[in-house]
Image (cartoon, coloured by chain):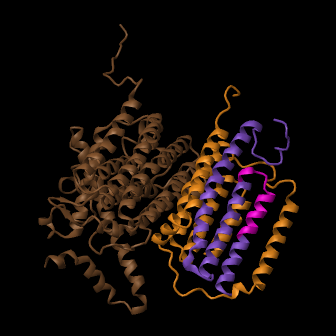
Chain colours: A orange, B purple, C brown
Amino acid sequence: MAVLTIAAAVAAMTLRNLVHCALALTVAFAGLAAAYLQLDAQFVGFAQIFVYIGAVAILLVFAILLTRGGEVPGQSVFSSSWVWGGLAALAVFATLAWAIQNSFASQREPAETVQASVKQIGDALMTQYVLPLEVIGLLLTAAMIGAVIIAMKEEGKE
Amino acid sequence: MTPLAAYLLLSAVLFSIGLAGALTRRNAIIVLIGIELMLNAANLNFIAFWRFGENPEALTGVLFAIFSIGIAAAEAAVGLALIIAIYRHYRTANVDEVNSLKG
Amino acid sequence: MFNSLDQLFVSLKHWLVGFAPAAWQPWVSALISAAAIIGVFALLFALVTVLERKGLGRIQNRYGPNRVGPAGFLQFAADGIKALTKEDLVPRAADKVIHFLAPIVLVMPVVLAFSVLPFGRDMVAVDFDAGVLFFFAVGAAAEVAVFMAGWSSRNKYSLLGAMRAIAQMISYEVPLILSAVTVIMMVGSLSTVQIVAAQGGYAGWLPDWHVFTPWGFAGFVLFMIAATAESNRSPFDMPEGESEIIAGYFVEYSGFKFALFFLGEYFGMFAISAMAITLFLGGWHAPFEALVWIPSWAWFFLKLMAIIFTFIWIRGTVPRLRIDQLMNFAWKFMLPMALINLVAAAVWHFMPTGLARWLVGVALVVGPYLLLGRGLMQNQNVGKRIYRYAD
């Protein structure tokens, strides 16, 4: 499962055809959702499928088609500074892997019974975390209006 | 390797792949995809630490992941709207060619 | 006696599972559930295709299929053999891998969606804590399949059809889920089993179904309209309008893959009808207390057939909408109504039982309906159309 997720992520980053990239990304999202389910986080797993596969992936393919990304580009798909980018990513991975291997926290055993029922999540959202919830509602509204205004045709220009 | 380390390593690999993609690809949409991957890797970390953490009944990791999914959705919408606006202006979605500050 | 009949399939499953070694029992149990769901609904699919053609025939004043088998009821077998033996064409320009995967990706989530639906007392494959969320989440995966099919065919019409289908599905998903949220809010659970259990009582001669409340009725109507759009059925069948874009996103499919699309579409319709039954029509509960002796699964399938019949009826009666009308309807009417309905449900919840609650509830639903309807109909000539002919 992890192998599939990683393979899909690599494919999403390297394939030449943008639509293939978006579809590979969908597979990676599904793999991550499966990982959440494995970790007993059922609600987050379903939310992941719902938001990422149902909304973000569709949004991506729409954007790809609107910007004529469906055609395979003739020139290289990598940007001019790709060497430095790749080196930076490798360095980041090396640091993270080193930290994980040497951290005492990674020796922990999982807690016996973990419950994240929908009821508990709802209670927490409505009591302790009600302010973040309101803020995120406001943020989503602002983002929606902003996105519509940005993507709207500029009057008279076209 | 312990289970927690395995999850963390998976998350690190995904983060690095996302970072590499965001830094090396030409197309702005792929850059956005890379950013999404990095966000997802961070989410996986939250969930893994919640599951293996001190007091899982506090649900902190799960709630953080939920909020982060919501923010990621907003970010994708705004990012793609920006890319479409840029495409309309420059007729390209290539980050190398969008380098002029003049409108 | 009645009880054993009611639990017939559950006992049968337990009996079968008993043969397996203890370690394997959960797997065997899941396998039997899956096999039963796929078998029963494949049979229902076969039956409904014939019924739909016959029903449409009757509405259009013709006979419909009546040659194969008794009264034409074996038509599905003929169709199936034809689909299986046809040549499987793949366009030369098509993206082969994605073209191949699309029908599979379409059918798989739809079948998964059945796993959270309670078909009778104790008859649910898995009772997820977040069952309704699971149902809608896997439903969302169908959109990806539609895109894959439309894009990989490298055909203008299929791409256009796919884009229309996705735009329509995303737009109608919002009111669909919002009308389901009212029920979730009132029951206080995302589990399908608990939603059905909450509708088990009888208040006087009316059962405690959600459809028999003002907000429930409005929610049910909204849900069914959105469900019609979501399963791409007439009058919302723009994505595959034969007269406009041939057959939409599956033009380039033939043979078995086309049959899979057909199957996926009908399975989607069954699943969403079953969800409507679970949310609003009391699941497997009997409508009258005197009729409780009829097995719960029989009630469920009776209700399912009734809803499917309504779908066929609507398809035979209502003409197709235009794409801009469809989008306007989703965003300007369905979405505000669904939101107001949410408020109506909340008010209903906090008012004491009695006539006042009914009056306020009805007013909260009917008032906005009239206002919105009138508001949208302004400046629109909806009178009798006058045709002018060349003299």
Q: Main secondary structure of the magenta part?
A: helix
Asked where in the image residue C259 lies, by quadrant, the reply is bottom left
Task: Tell me where the magenta segment starts and ends, as one range.
Answer: B14-29
Instruction: Kindly give the residue lying farthest to the top in the view shown.
Output: C391
Can you say whether A11 is above or below A96 in the image?
A: above
| Image coords of residue B19 (percent x, y) | 77, 63
**Residue C285 shows in this picture:** yes
**Residue C49 left/right relative to C184:** left
Figure disc tally:
0
Whether B18 is among the magenta residues is yes
**Residue C77 shows in this picture:** no
**Residue A102 left/right relative to C67:** right
In the rendered image, the quadrant that contains the C terminus of chain C is top left
Asked where in the image residue B18 lies, by quadrant, the reply is bottom right
Residue pictured at 15% horizontal, 62% vertical: C288
Residue pictured at 64% horizontal, 58% vertical: B72
Instruction: Kindly give the residue lying farthest to the left in the view shown.
Output: C290
| Image coords of residue C201 (percent x, y) | 22, 66
Whether C163 is among the magenta residues is no
Can you say whether C16 is above or below C37 in the image?
A: below
| Image coords of residue B5 (percent x, y) | 69, 82
In the rendered image, the quadrant that contains the N terminus of chain C is bottom left
Residue pictured at 35% horizontal, 25% vertical: C382
Can you say whether A84 is above or below A67 in the image?
A: below
Residue pictured at 44% horizontal, 44% vertical: C335
